[in-house]
């Protein structure tokens, strides 16, 4: 049996984890998160493709690739969460294709600055998990494996 493919996609500034505002985002690096995700995916029988970009167009291209490959998506859209209608429209293609898209966040945007309270992605996501640090990624994988 072939493992289900999950794209784990990360938006802008997440390459700076570990050094960027550790009081909010923690001390783990994105490489640490990728290792945790890989181990969890293996234990759940999932295959992951873990990527990060600071470029909106590249992220949208990856979401299109996930649609074309029939993959589920775990997405940390980072700042694109709050204003990128282009990312939102690409995410809608995931869920209308029959795949699942889980929006995740390391911190809880609802407890932060007011501009972070609105997600343009949430309305087209299968679900949202926020506030559990790197555990948000693991919870998303577990939800997809169910």
Image: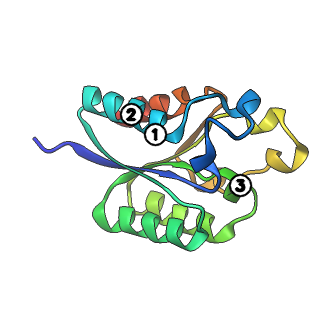
Mark 3 — residue?
Answer: 79
Mark 2 — residue?
Answer: 35
- Residue 16: give x, y in percent of width and height: 62, 46
For residue 138, what is the image quadrant? top left
Helix, strand or loop at label 3? It is helix
> Pointers 3 and 1 in contact (CB under 8 A)?
no
74 and 24: which one is in front?
24
Instruction: Point out the tag, 3 or 2, that comes first from the N-terminus.
Output: 2
> Residue shown at 60%/62% (left/top)?
54
110 and 23: which one is in front?
23
- Residue 76 badge: none
Q: Residues within 10 Å of mark 2 (few under 14, many from 20)?
A: few
> Pointers 1 and 2 in contact (CB under 8 A)?
yes
- Residue 30: give x, y in percent of width and height: 51, 41
- Residue 65: give x, y in percent of width and height: 37, 67
Q: Residue 120: tell me if it is visible.
A: no
Helix, strand or loop at label 2? It is helix
| Relative side of 143 to 40, left or right | right
- Residue 31 badge: 1
- Residue 134: give x, y in percent of width and height: 54, 30
């Amino acid at each position: 049996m072939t493992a289900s493919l999950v794209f784990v996609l990360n938006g802008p500034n997440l390459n700076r984890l570990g050094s960027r505002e550790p009081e909010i985002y923690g001390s783990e690096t994105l490489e640490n998160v990728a290792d945790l995700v890989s181990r969890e995916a293996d234990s759940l029988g999932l295959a992951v493709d873990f990527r990060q970009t600071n470029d909106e167009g590249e992220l949208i291209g990856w979401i299109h690739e996930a649609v074309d490959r029939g993959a589920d998506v775990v997405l940390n859209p980072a700042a694109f969460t709050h204003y990128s209608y282009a990312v939102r429209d690409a995410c809608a293609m995931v869920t209308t294709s029959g795949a699942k898209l889980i929006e995740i966040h390391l911190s809880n945007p609802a407890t932060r600055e007011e501009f972070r309270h609105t997600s343009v992605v949430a309305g087209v996501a299968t679900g949202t998990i926020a506030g559990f640090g790197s555990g948000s990624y693991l919870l998303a994988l577990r939800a997809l494996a169910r």
